[in-house]
Image: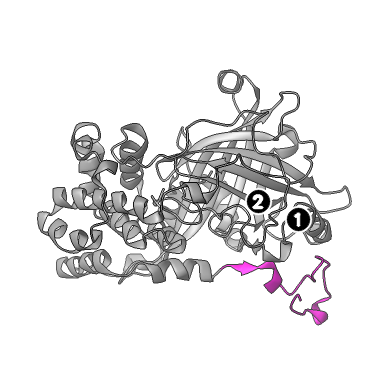
Amino acid sequence: MRTAILCSAVVLGPGAAGFAVTRVPYGAAGRSTDSAMRFPEGAGCSSWPRFSDIAAPLLASAVLLAGVASPALAENELALLAQGQIKPELIDTQCFAKSCKLQTTACAENGDCLKGLTCAAKCMGDTECTVGCFARFGNQALNDVLSCTIEDAGCLKIAIVAPGADGPLDAPLPPKALVATTPASMSGKWYKVMGFNSNYDCYECQKNSFKPMAKQQAINIGASGQVVDVDVEYTMPRDRAGSPSKNFHAELHEKLVFDTAPGSRRTAHTEGKMFGLTFWENWYVIGANDRSEDQFRFVYYTGKTLQNKYEGAFIYARKPELPASAMPHIYKLAREAGFEPTSFCAIDNKCFTTLENTFAAAPPPFTPVAVAADSSLQQTLERASAESLIAPPSALERLFRDANEFLEDPRPYGKAIFSKQKHMSEIREFDFNGKQLPSENFQPSR
């Protein structure tokens, strides 16, 4: 479940192009470039357009939508941002009105949708910045206009990768041998506790729940393998000018198909949507716990959207904490696969210590397709928070806030999100090889 990306920058805000979460390019810091995994010749970043080539159409769409909502706004700040970078051949202006009229109108009438487009355009390909935009302004109206104008109708002509999933025999090779994995061995709740790709794998409070799919539905979807439903949850901070900090609790529903074809290069594959944009992924389970260790699974993945290809890795555990007894094994597996485990992030899951009972008592409904959405639980918590005691802003205050959010520099908000991440090298409980240290001997890893 990822978002659209372009090389090392988000271009359609992963997941997930600039509206989506950007992925780290192959061979990036922390990952050995001599890994067994290789993509076809010509798939590298050098063959793709510059980030600004994609950000410009994004900005153009913001200008067009702003013109629907407020002609004056389209004539000043947004127009100035373009700076001659908008390429007419990438934008079908008639398409917005003809093929995506409902979505375009809804976005133009939704302040956050319009702010999200403008915010991501200002980022001009900066990953942290664009992630911050979606954390602050992401909503269904933004998802819908991106899905229609980029994928369904092609109003923004920025697709550079052919759509569709890889086959089991032509998927990228894994960085090390697969371990035997079945849907039954993955059933139940798993928490992500370590992640390789800081742009997506390291969000707070990540829980994945695996459960069997209804038999007939599974037959229809997974003719080539066994199918399970995966309910995904993660959290991002939502900071807005003049308002208390909140959490944007997102959910995603995926159908994971376990491959049964002889000679398959991967364990499973999935398809879904995030921020309105489609992704296709290959999953590789390359490590699992021994009987004497805390349960874990080491998952490597590769994926693509219409805008990019990406990779990542994470550690699943049965509890929302690092599996202490298995850490030396995990570190060993990571290095065998060409990763440096001390560069992985330690995912902050402390929210589960106070919210797990609430999740169990009132599980939020999942959408019937793989689409990220605001959580009903989050809305309930927000209503019960101290914010409800604060008087709503006046019309003048709202006007000032809206103007400020359209004109502000969005980069500090993105940086603030990523600054909270901690690498395993900062977790003093474990040494360089993952061995747990007595509490009185905690010391930084070398």
Q: Earlier in the sequence, mark 1 or mark 2?
A: 2
Q: Where residue 334 is drawn, which disc sits there? A: 1
Q: Give neighbour class at mark 2: few <14, some 14-19, many 20+ (Cα, 10 Å).
A: many
| The magenta segment | 421-446
Residue 27 as seen in the image, left or right of residue 304: right
Main SS, magenta region, reads loop
Q: Is residue 79 above or below residue 241?
A: above
Q: Is residue 438 above or below residue 82?
A: below
Q: Position of residue 273 (x, y in %)?
A: 46, 39
- Residue at mark 2: 313
In contact (CB < 8 Å): disc 1 and disc 2:
yes
Count all numbered tags in the image, as a single digit.
2
Q: CA distance from mark 1 to mark 2?
A: 9 Å
Q: Give neighbour class at mark 1: few <14, some 14-19, many 20+ (Cα, 10 Å).
A: many
Q: Amino acid at mark 2?
A: Ala
Q: Amino acid at mark 1?
A: Ala
Residue 53 as seen in the image, left or right of residue 79: right
Q: Residue at x 72, y 57 (%)?
A: 339
Residue 211 as seen in the image, left or right of residue 99: right
Quadrant position of the N terminus in the picture: top right
Q: Residue at x 73, y 42 (%)?
A: 285
